[in-house]
Image (spheres, rainbow, N blue to C red):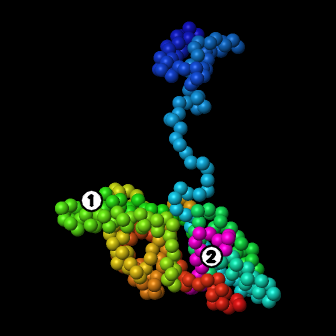
Amino acid sequence: MKHDCVFILKVATACLTIIWKAVRFSQMVSFATVGFYDQGNFTPIVALPILNDMNRPHAPAQQLPDPTIEISEGWHCLHIYYLLDRVTLQQLSPEEISAGVEEFKAVLNPEAEHAPERVQSFVVSGHRADIGLMLMDKDPLMIDALHQKLMSTKIGLALEPTYSFVSLTEVSEYVPTVEQYSEKLRLGGTSPDDPSYAAKVKAYEQRLPMMNKQRLYPDFPDWPIHCFYPMNKSRVPDANWYMEPFSKRSALMSEHATSGIKFAGRVSQLITASTGFDDWEWGVTLWGRTPEYIKEIVYTMRFDQASAKYAEFGEFYIGYIMDAEAILKHLQIQ
């Protein structure tokens, strides 16, 4: 029996040894001895090569950026909403409220040294919040520091954060390149020989860098209405956005963008990306010249297939943009 076992093990290990010969390099493998015990004595048969994880051949090292909390392009973004606790506020002395008012205005001063690149404040309509902030900067800790400073003021004792949304600015993959825009014109029936073709392509080529800069490093419009809501693309059967080919998704988003362009001069929109940063995939910020324009653009775009079939929406927050002093006056704190 012992001789049969020895023979079987020798055949098996011989086969394995042949397979592993190609990787039998001292710097890549170690060896495990295989044999059997007989009455307490170990009889070695063969040394099997074992490829170690530590010594596996690796792909050539890529040029990686230094570790950082900043993103390679664009800004971090935070939408955060606070509810005023008037019971706590009433427990503060007049001196504490007076000091808190000055602290509050100093913290929300967009020109202060501690201020992020973008600071926008507003009062919020409805019971879910009283104050809202939209903050942007390359450094997420500078954004969070403003929130911490606000909470550490005397007025901050009476503020309860009720909702926040963390995201990043981005240039969407559905924004056409110049080549894709040219192809779209051709597919739409505009011949490359048509003088308007070259004019449209050139105009888009000049406009695209400015549009992308506004997406990554946006200037906030000087309009009074601020609307925010989060959204996802659906994954339900028969309406799974992520199972559709890129060509179809791109066409649907092009239709969606065309609907939005009709509101130029009335509504400004910014989409920020939150995949991996928050529970929703995108945040939508709208600024309106008047309140009804917000209602109209949201209603109109609901009929686009990208929304009607594939979109899921969170709660909407409507705010009216004010500086810190106007907010305090509106909330009847000073």
Q: What stretch is highlighted in magenta?
A: 110-130
**Visible residue check, residue 36:** yes
Report the quarter where the C terminus lies: bottom right
**Left or right: 152, with 34 as reference point:** right
Q: Distance between the residues labelled 2 and 1?
A: 43 Å
Among numbered discs 2 and 1, the one appearing first in the sequence: 2
Q: Which amino acid does label 2 sit on?
A: Pro
Instruction: Identify residue type, mark 1.
Output: Glu
Q: Where is residue 134 in the image (x, y as percent from the top left)?
A: 58, 74
- Mark yes or no: residue 229 visible: no
Residue at 27 percent across and 67 percent down: it is 199
Tag of residue 183: 1
Secondary structure mostly taken by the magenta-highlighted segment of the chain: loop
Where residue 137 sits, quadrant-wise, is bottom right
Which residue is under mark 2?
110
Q: What element carries label 2?
A: loop
